Image (cartoon, rainbow, N blue to C red):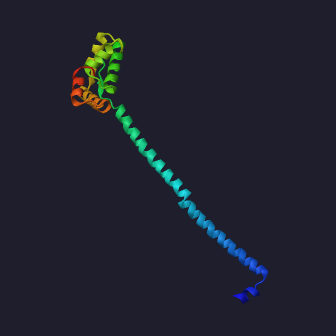
Amino acid sequence: MANERKDLTNEELLERQQQQFENYKQEQKKKSKKKWLFGCGGCLGLVIIIAIIFTACSATMVNEVDKEINKDTSEVKKDDNSTSEQNAALNSAKTYADTMHMSKDAIYNQLTSDAGDKFSDEDAQYAVDHLKANYKENALKSAESYMKDQNMSKDAIYDQLISGCW
């Protein structure tokens, strides 16, 4: 080996060193790409995948909530001879039944109240008579709300439901 080095000229040694250096640089590039792939690049890829999964899951939940909100529990049967006030009272009654889960009496009281919609007794009665609501389901949803949001006991919920204030 020592004889070989003596036989090589300085130029050949320099060329051999340059070749070894180029090989070393190429190996380092390959290693740095692997480090990036498993280091920063891997973390970035993982974050992107998690974001995609989160977005897909949240979109699914939003769609389910929208379907639940838009589900009508009451129907309106309009009479061709009804007045615009009666139709307005009927639409308000439907809103109270669907969103606030009110009882028939509570809807009537809200429609005629001075603090409420201020409809006449006749228009409010028309609305209540022509509203097809599932009052049992409304009572159940109100009871669930009382228990969850207000931490009421079963006896207190019962008293609240039979009081006619819901």
Q: Residue 76 appears in which quarter of the rendering? A: top left
Relative side of 14 to 85, left or right: right
Residue occupying the far bottom of the picture:
3
In front here: 2 or 89? 2
Up the image or down, 29 lies above or below 152; here it is below
Query: Residue drawn at (34%, 34%), measured in percent from left and top?
Result: 68
Image x and y of residue 84, in percent: 36, 13
Query: Residue drawn at (24%, 20%), measured in percent from left and top?
Result: 164
In front here: 125 or 48? 48
Residue occupying the far right of the picture:
10
For the question of whether residue 135 can be seen, the reply is: yes
Image x and y of residue 129, in percent: 25, 17
Up the image or down, 79 lies above or below 75; here it is above
Image x and y of residue 71, in percent: 33, 32
Query: Residue drawn at (23%, 20%), measured in percent from left and top?
Result: 163
In front here: 148 or 164? 148
Up the image or down, 19 lies above or below 92; here it is below
Query: Residue drawn at (26%, 22%), measured in percent from left and top?
Result: 103
Relative side of 12 to 56, left or right: right
Q: Residue 120 appears in which quarter of the rendering? A: top left
Relative side of 26 to 163, left or right: right
Q: Quadrant of the N terminus?
A: bottom right
Image x and y of residue 165, in percent: 27, 20
